[in-house]
């Protein structure tokens, strides 16, 4: 133990002799880890939020497909589905997207009563009249209306319609309601010019969740022009989407990792004359090659683990304290009102381990290999240069 402590003391003194060079290396190293860690942490947090928000999603969503695209579905399809064994309930939903050129974002319009979820309101109520609506906080931030104010929108015929805001959703429901506007069903049908015999889609609830896939196949068999989508498929789609986007960002960030590896290799293989002379003196004083490698190993571990810790803390602060402002638009998408919510601080230990192996391992190797080549060389040759 005393021998190990002496080696550690020598390692720290050696690092402090080249403190400015090592501090610059740690700064670059930590920044690279922070970028990669931010992508991993943000992806994990978005997956968690999406999964949590979809826990109350319908068991099956039934859409009608025409010419390979989502089309309005006849409401009478619900009767065919309702007769299938195992179906608990079937209801129609009327909803759609509205692009506002003023704020350059897509809004989601939903008919009151079309969703089984009970959406809490900060104040006010759901619309009861044709000229009323309830809005999410993202729309309030974009347009500025409060309870009792008016919201002007342009319908499918190009006519301007004015609606009184009677409800505002709570901030806690931002992930679901940030860009949402709720109308009476007949109001929304008139706004989008949707016939009463048609709906946007049907939602199906089942008695036994284990029969969901079987019922989806039955619906497809009886209604060949439909596309039943289960909740598990929606969750899988979100997970695949976030994995794809994070993968693209990691591919870009890998360039920074490769650049750092080149920097580390250049730094390690280009041992200065002072460092080589130091190793030669140690060998001449009787140090074994293993002792020299132990010193270099501790040097590499101090620099790499310090950088890893600083980088992970920086990534954690960037994502969970500041909300990842540099990465959020890239992962969430474009032409949307970004919901303002706090990410749940979740860290996947496996991801941290992989990140450590990808960053710490190469640096340690780049430190030990040139030190070993110098240590096995005759000390006299090393000190003479």
Image: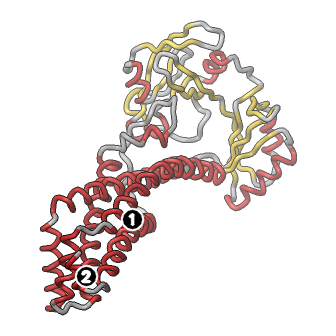
Q: Quadrant of the C terminus?
A: bottom left
Q: Quadrant of residue 184?
A: top right
User: Which quadrant of the figure contains the N terminus?
Assistant: bottom left
Residue projecting furthest to the top: 159
Nearest to N terminus: mark 1 or mark 2: 1
The image's mark for residue 381 is 2
> Do the residues under discs 1 and 2 have CB atoms within 8 angstroms?
no
Residue topped by disc 1: 359
| Vertical position of residue 55 compared to residue 118: above or below | below
Find residue 16 and name its label.
none
Residue visible at 38% across and 33% down in the picture: 122
As helix, strand or loop, the secondary structure at mark 1 comes to helix
Q: Where residue 277 sits: x, y (%)?
A: 19, 76
Quadrant position of residue 34: bottom left
Between residue 211 and residue 363, name the one nearer to us.
363
Residue 344: x %, y % from top left: 38, 52
Count of numbered labels shown in the rendering: 2
- Residue 379 can be seen, yes or no: yes
- Res 56 seen here: no
210 left or right of 287 in image: right
Q: Is residue 368 left or right of residue 164?
A: left
| Residue at 35 percent of width and 62 percent of height | 266
Q: Residue at x 36, y 70 (%)?
A: 366
Depth order, front residue of 100/193 = 100
């Amino acid at each position: 133990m005393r021998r190990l402590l002496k080696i550690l003391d020598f390692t720290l003194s050696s690092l402090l002799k080249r403190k400015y060079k090592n501090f610059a290396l740690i700064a670059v190293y930590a920044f690279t880890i922070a970028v990669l860690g931010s992508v991993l942490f943000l992806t994990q947090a978005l997956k968690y939020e999406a999964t949590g928000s979809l826990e109350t999603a319908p068991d099956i969503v039934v859409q009608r497909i025409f010419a390979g695209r989502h089309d309005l579905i006849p409401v009478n399809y619900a009767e065919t589905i309702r007769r299938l064994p195992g179906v608990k309930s079937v209801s129609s939903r009327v909803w759609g997207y509205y692009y506002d050129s003023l704020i350059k974002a897509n809004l989601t319009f939903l008919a009151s009563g079309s969703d089984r979820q009970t959406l809490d309101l900060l104040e006010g109520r759901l619309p009861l009249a044709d000229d009323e609506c309830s809005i999410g906080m993202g729309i309030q931030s974009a347009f500025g209306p409060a309870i009792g104010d008016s919201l002007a929108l342009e319908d499918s015929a190009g006519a301007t319609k004015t609606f009184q805001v009677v409800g505002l959703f709570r901030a806690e429901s931002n992930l679901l309601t940030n860009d949402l506007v709720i109308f009476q069903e007949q109001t929304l049908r008139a706004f989008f010019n949707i016939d009463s015999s048609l709906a946007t889609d049907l939602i199906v609830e089942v008695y036994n969740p284990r029969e969901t896939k079987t019922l989806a196949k039955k619906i497809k068999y009886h209604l060949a022009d439909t596309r039943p989508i289960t909740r598990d498929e929606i969750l899988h789609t979100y997970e695949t989407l976030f994995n794809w986007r994070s993968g693209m960002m990691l591919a870009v960030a890998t360039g920074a990792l490769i650049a750092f590896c080149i920097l580390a290799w250049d730094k390690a293989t280009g041992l200065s004359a002072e460092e080589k002379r130091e190793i030669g003196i140690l060998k001449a004083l009787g140090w074994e090659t293993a002792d020299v490698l132990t010193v270099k190993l501790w040097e590499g571990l101090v620099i790499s683990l310090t950088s890893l810790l600083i980088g992970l803390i920086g990534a954690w602060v960037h994502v969970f304290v500041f909300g990842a402002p540099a990465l959020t638009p890239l992962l969430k998408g474009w032409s949307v009102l970004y919901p303002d919510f706090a990410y749940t601080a979740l860290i996947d230990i496996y991801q941290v381990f992989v990140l450590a192996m990808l960053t710490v391992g190469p640096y340690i190797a780049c430190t030990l290999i040139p030190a070993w080549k110098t240590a096995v060389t005759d000390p006299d040759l090393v000190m003479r240069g």
